[in-house]
Image (tube, rainbow, N blue to C red):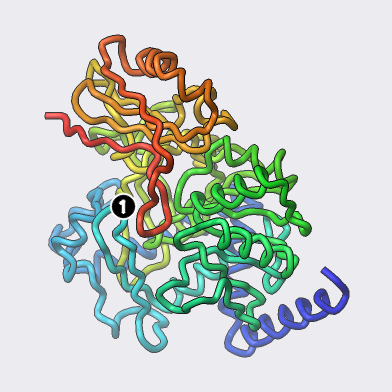
Amino acid sequence: MNRDMELTTILKQKKFWINDFLHGGCLWNDFKEIRFIYENPEKGELIRERRLHEILDFAKQNIPFYQKWNGKLESFNDFPVVNKQIYLQHYADFLTPKERIPGQKGELHIQRTSGSTGTPFEVPQDTRCRTRRVATIKFGNELIGFRSFEPMVHLRSLKQYYTGNPSVINKNLNITYADNSNLNDKKIKDIINVINSTKAKVVRGYTTPIDIICSYAISHGLTLSSHPTFITGGEGLMDSLRLKIINGLHCNVVSQYANEENGVFGQTELNGKGTSIILNRANCIIEILKLDSDEPASPGELGRIVVTDFFNYAFPMIRYDIGDVASIGKVQNGILMSIDNLVGRKGDMVYGTKGQWIDVVNSMSTEIHNNLKIQQWQFIQEGEKEYTLRLVSTDAETRQNAKHFENMMKELLGEDAVVHVEYPEEIPVLSSGKRKVVICKYKKR
């Protein structure tokens, strides 16, 4: 950034925090607490225990769903594991009457999930919950050296809001929103020009459009002059994209793990593997439970991610099975510090020919997911022992080597697997802009 831009950024930062101070300093207090818990795991655990007991006690006294348990919820583990279907079936029983929400100011915020990869869902969020989310994002950004109001490019679909504009600038936040819907060569060039002209320090967006843009830049010899850090989300960060960004574009990358309902759960180390997430412990407790029961998973075992949110008093989310799968990572003095082998949704796992669960994302050969000659790949389980591997590649040798890839997948799935290898021109994205890497169409009886 030049000197004038630096001065503008500093003035915006000071104005923001002064305004927060004049309104009680709520966001600054949340920011400080998040940082303290991150930097002081053992002392921070006392705060987390207090936050947990506060939300549990509140739920027992104010939420009809938990009141029906008639005093049987004496400890955390007594609370039932719930999922999106249970919330939808008993929606009214999870709502807190507005007059009982502590510190609520004005109307509740309704956070909607897109429904592109599952069932649409609306979660009311109270004032404190929203403040905490903003503080969490600010802290996560500062971990990678990005401070609020420095230039950012945020990739998102603008087609429903703006017509014909490749980008829209929010001058107050110093964020440029670049349209990544229906990406073609012209749009990609426009986005690269926006990144360079704004001297963006960070580029944020879904993994799939970032992959498309980075691949185009590398193949056409284009550079990103400000060497921004990429923040990917919405999908797992594959090694192939991570290495493109680091080695091909000479930029840094971090993958944030989050959902719409609860916010940011954590992020990778800078340039670290996308399947290993350092947890944001300040806002929730994360459990890893077995795939087929509510017992804790063993170290190294893949299990369901279950979240207890400390801060949404409008719609308490306690032991919420969010549908994702991972294994226990680093544990320090009994505190879960990170998760490993983040797969994505349980529905993104497949069955081998003997009925065993297989984590394709973490088990796929590097010859596929870390091969610059393969631009995209997708794996589909069609039936009990029938599978399709789709590879997008313009490399003649790769396109003529179907038998090799078929045998490679049989080693993973079982020798009696029937594997079809296809070479489409493109693997379509969902309406959200995400691309599903693994699809399981088979339902085990």
Residue in the picture at 44% in, 14% down = 404
Viewer-side residue, 268 vs 126: 268
Q: Would residue 174 be visible to someone looking at this image? A: yes
**Which one is in front, 73 or 121?**
121
Whole-percent x, y for residue 334 in the image: 50, 38
**Quadrant of image for the N terminus:** bottom right
Position of the C terminus by quadrant: top left
Residue 57: quadrant of the picture: bottom left
Q: Determine which residue is flagged by label 1.
A: 117
Q: Position of residue 137 (x, y in %)?
A: 57, 64
36 to 245, vertically: above or below:
below
Residue placed most toward the observer, 136 or 412: 412
Q: Quadrant of residue 406?
A: top left
Residue shown at 15%/63% (left/top)? 90
Which amino acid lies under the numbered mark 1 shown in the image of this protein?
Thr
- Indicate whether 46 appears above or below 372: below
